[in-house]
Image (cartoon, rainbow, N blue to C red):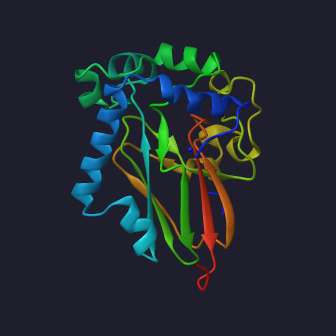
Amino acid sequence: MKLKTRIKPGTFAEQGKRNRIGTPTMRPVLRYGLLAGWLMFAGATFAFAQENSPSLAQVVALDECDPATFNAALGPDFCKNVALAALGYATTLSDLFQKAGNGTPDPGWDFEPDTVKIKEGATLSVVDQGGEPHTFTEVAQFGGGFIGPLNHGEATVPECAGGFSNVAVAKTRILQASHIDIPGLKKGKHLFECCIHPWMRVTVEVKGRGEK
């Protein structure tokens, strides 16, 4: 269907994950505080959804877009990260591109968790709790998205080619505060990435109904 665990060094996305180690303490605390707040509001936790529920697993898309610079370049209301911006934890559009171009993509753009284990028949629910749109696109191999300057030399994977002019890619888009459900994943390993910010990646391991 088309619609981080220590990471070995060597690729653009992995450098971005390692960059998380150098992020100031308050920044991840705020991010995960917001994430925890959403989970409490929803009345569930990742552990509950992924381990105790045979039918549902959740993934959250996060980012730290700066409304002023993103909206000036991309249009009104493109970025709606008002809370983070007010607290000084937003990333400008130019900084986002510069970090990606340097091979250290901003770790504030992230899918959580990075690895999901579910049983066959479960539904994967992906919610955008960031401030801008993302995609959750299944790919055969991780690679670049459809915005070249954010790829740091990685080739665009076929599943992201064409951007939103490709109906298959457009169907995997998630708008801010919305979600998509992905049912019926077959047994085995499934790779998903954001075709806009390709260092946002998730591995989904699907086990058979009778497997532990």
Q: Position of residue 100 (x, y in %)?
A: 60, 21
Q: Quadrant of residue 132?
A: top left
Which is more toward the observer, 65 or 107? 107
Write down the quadrant of residue 74 in the picture. top left
Asked whether, in this view, residue 202 is left or right of residue 65, the answer is: right
17 to the left or right of 65 = right
Residue occupying image coordinates x 55% and y 78%: 121
Look at the image and tell me in which quarter the C terminus lies.
bottom right
Image location (x, y in percent) of residue 115: 56, 54
Going 39% across and 59% down the picture, which residue do you hit?
46
**In terms of depth relative to the viewer, which is nearer, 88 or 7?**
7
Left or right: 53 as drawn, with respect to 142? left
81 vs 72: above or below: below
Q: Residue furthest bottom?
A: 210
Position of residue 5 relative to residue 57, above or below, is: above
Residue 161: % across, % down: 71, 40
Nearest the viewer among 205 and 42 is: 205
Instruction: Write the residue at 75% across / 53% down.
Output: 140
Residue drawn at (34%, 36%) of the image: 31
Image quadrant in which you'd find residue 203: bottom right
The image quadrant where one finds the N terminus is bottom right
**Image-based side of 168 in relation to 97, left or right:** right
Q: Position of residue 4 (x, y in %)?
A: 56, 44
Q: How many marks?
A: 0
